[in-house]
Amino acid sequence: MISVTLRRTLRASGPAACAGAVLLLVLASVGVAETEKQARTASPDTAITMQGGQEGTVFKDLVVEGEDLVQVEFERPELRVDLDPQTAPGLQWGSIQQTLDRSQPNLVSPLVGFFAYDHFSYQARPWLDLLASGSVARFRPSVKDLERWQLTVANSRGETVAKFSGTGKPPEQIEWNGVSMDGKPSPPGLTYSYVFEAFDRAGNKRNFVGEGFELPPYCVQTKEGYAMLFPGRDASTSEGSTYAGPTVPSPVLLDVANRINQSEKVLQPVRVEVTARSAEKAKSLADGVAEALSSLVLGGKMRIQSFTSVETDAPADGTVRVVLSR
């Protein structure tokens, strides 16, 4: 606006007017320069109060330069949640085990899939009920009109191992569990004999001598623990196939291992006691039984303990007694 006014003034006046106009132009320029200088030298922290709380204040264009020049404060309402974590649905407290089980890996499915195609050496074999329990020998006397009677069982050495007696008519069946009179289980593999003595009212005596017999593999509860007895010939292994492995344990050893694994005493030692006519035979038989059981019994070799003894009148193949200690 100033430049336009000056040009019109110069056209309308003479030289004197031109000199005055030039002077006004110089003064105006000096004033603008001074204003710009004051703006550049103004203090950067000049306090500016914006009357934002007063009615009628209008901010059209507002430019804020720098940091922390404008601070707006307002009250935040207090957050109150009416919620009890103890009774809120879906927030029930659980145990530490439940928390850990949330990320527990699934071990059942791989195990079932593995044993669906692979043989499990510790599996139960209920069909192998080869060890007799309870009565291992039964006697059925068929005599009448007796005053009293007596049944004597002796081993191959002529020693009495069991004796039964009574008055009147004897029972239809007399059972023996294999335990001798001294409380020890009688070894299988030996030949036993029995004699039935009958006395009538007049005091006459008549003896009935039975045929010799052998005890089958059996199990019995003793003071030492759960004992399983069988002759040494029943512990022999056979050559296996490509699927079963190099050797196949005998059915008796499988039944012995099955009974041990079903017991709740998984930490008790297993004693393998072998009696044979020579030390070499006893050691060979004990090592074979221990080796076979170590791969079938839970705990492996750490639980197996072998003991041997030599008796000249032992069975030719020896006898084996496996005891699960109390």
Image (cartoon, rainbow, N blue to C red):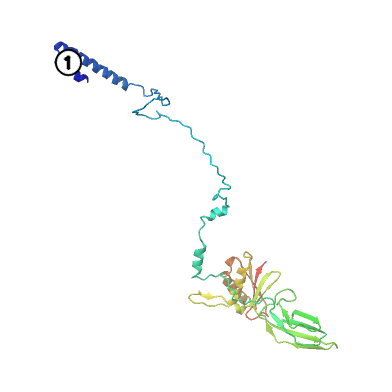
Query: Residue at coordinates 17% horizontally, 15% vertically from top-left?
Result: 9
> Can residue 158 be seen in this snapshot?
no
In the image, residue 320 lies at what x, y percent? 64, 75
Q: Quadrant of residue 184?
A: bottom right
Report crowding for label 1: few under 14, some 14 to 19, many 20 or more residues within 10 A (C-alpha).
some
**Residue furthest right in the image:** 202
Residue 289 visible in the picture: yes
Q: Nearer the viewer, residue 242 or 59?
A: 59
Q: Quadrant of residue 255?
A: bottom right
> In the image as oriented, which residue stretches furthest toward the top?
16
- Near-viewer residue (269 or 77): 77
Query: Which residue is under mark 1?
Result: 9
Residue 153: x, y in percent? 74, 82
When asked about the image quadrant of residue 71, the answer is: top left
Residue sitting at the far front = 56
- In the foreground, 295 or 134: 134
Q: Is residue 145 above or below residue 244?
A: below
Percent position of residue 32, x then y: 26, 19
Identify whether 146 is placed above or below 87: below
Total of numbered circles in the picture? 1
Position of the N terminus by quadrant: top left
Left or right of 66, for residue 144: right
Element marked by disc 1: helix
Q: Disc 1 residue type? A: Thr
Above or below, comparing residue 109 to residue 316 in the picture: above
The answer to whether residue 191 is left or right of residue 123 is right
**Nearer the observer, 251 or 96:** 96
Give the position of the C terminus as an image quadrant. bottom right
Q: Whole-percent x and y of residue 319?
A: 64, 77
